[in-house]
Amino acid sequence: MPELPEVEALAGYLRERAAGRRVDRIEIAAISALKTYDPAPAAASGRTVTDARRHGKFLDVVLDGELHLVVHLARAGWLHYRESFPSAAPLRPGKGPIALRVRLDDGSGFDLTEAGTQKKLAAYLVTDPAQVPGVAKLGPDALAADLPTFAERIRSRRGQVKGVLTDQAVLAGVGNAYSDEILHAARLSPFALTDRLTDAQLAALHEATRRVLGDAVARSLGQKAAELKGEKRSGLTVHARAGLPCPVCGDTVREVSFADSSLQYCPTCQTGGKPLADRRLSRLVR
């Protein structure tokens, strides 16, 4: 799933490449992806792209006349920028990966695609990003929150720190991959309870969040959209590395699997050397 660093980089890429171009038209190939009907997609035609922004993990393409194309790429969505398209014919609704296409006046543009069968990519055409339910519910940006705000938000929800850190209403922008990286950097178990974290542990978690996300943004900025996934993978230390040695201590990275997701961690760095039981509501094996 694209998270804060990748969406920030996509916004930067669009500011560089698309800002100042007029929208020729927006084409919808997956009707279920468009979550709004007023304004209609035709309202974007002839408007100039003035900016691209990020709200948590939402990408906001800003058009003149106070119109916003806000996109959540979900788990398997992505943005592909095209210098030209193979055909001028409009897209037809179908079963392909393309959900939405934006054509610009110079013949370039971008496709929003989604792989797999679980189609959850969502696009909204609105006059205010706050009209998007997910944006309206966002907590403070994870990269911008100072320590007092960060600590207050984490302590506002009692639960396992992994789940609280990825709750977008608590802090915006962190998903499954970077939460694994942040918790490893902070040397915290993903199952540590937020109401038992000490001030020192919260400070370490805040510092790790800023460092991990900041480093990822720095690596991602300036990359083309097609290069961002590879850049993300190259910077991971524990996420998606189960069975490989931890680059910090050499212990084997372990995994806990859930119904539709998994987490990775290092026992030596994070759980005092004890493995976590691989079941949904597991605690440290005693």
Image (cartoon, rainbow, N blue to C red):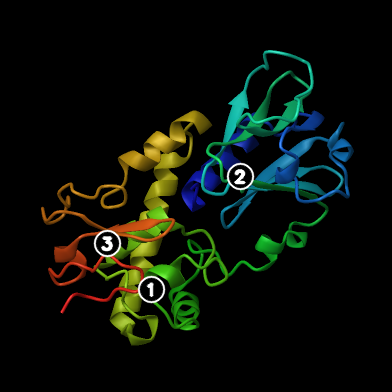
Q: State the residue position of label 1.
A: 161
Q: Amino acid at mark 1?
A: Val
Task: Specify the label residue 184 is tagged with.
Answer: 3
Give the mark nearer the N terminus: 3 vs 1: 1
Mark 2–mark 1 distance (CA, rounded to whole Å)? 28 Å
Camera-side residue of 31 and 37: 31
Quick check: 256 left or right of 260? left
| Residue at image point 88% right, 50% down | 38
Q: Is residue 266 above or below residue 236?
A: below
Residue type marked 3: His
- Above or below residue 22? Residue 145 is below
Q: Residues within 10 Å of mark 3 (few under 14, many from 20)?
A: many
Which residue is disc 2 drawn over?
119
Q: CA distance from mark 3 to mark 1?
A: 12 Å
Q: Under tag 1, what secondary structure? A: helix
Q: Nearer the viewer, residue 105 or 26?
A: 26
C-alpha separation, residue under disc 2 versus residue under disc 3? 31 Å
Q: Secondary structure at mark 3?
A: helix
- Residue depth check, mark 3 versus mark 1: number of the one nearer the observer: 1
Pick whichever, 227 or 159, lies toward us.
159
Q: Quick check: marks 3 and 1 in contact, CB under 8 Å?
A: no
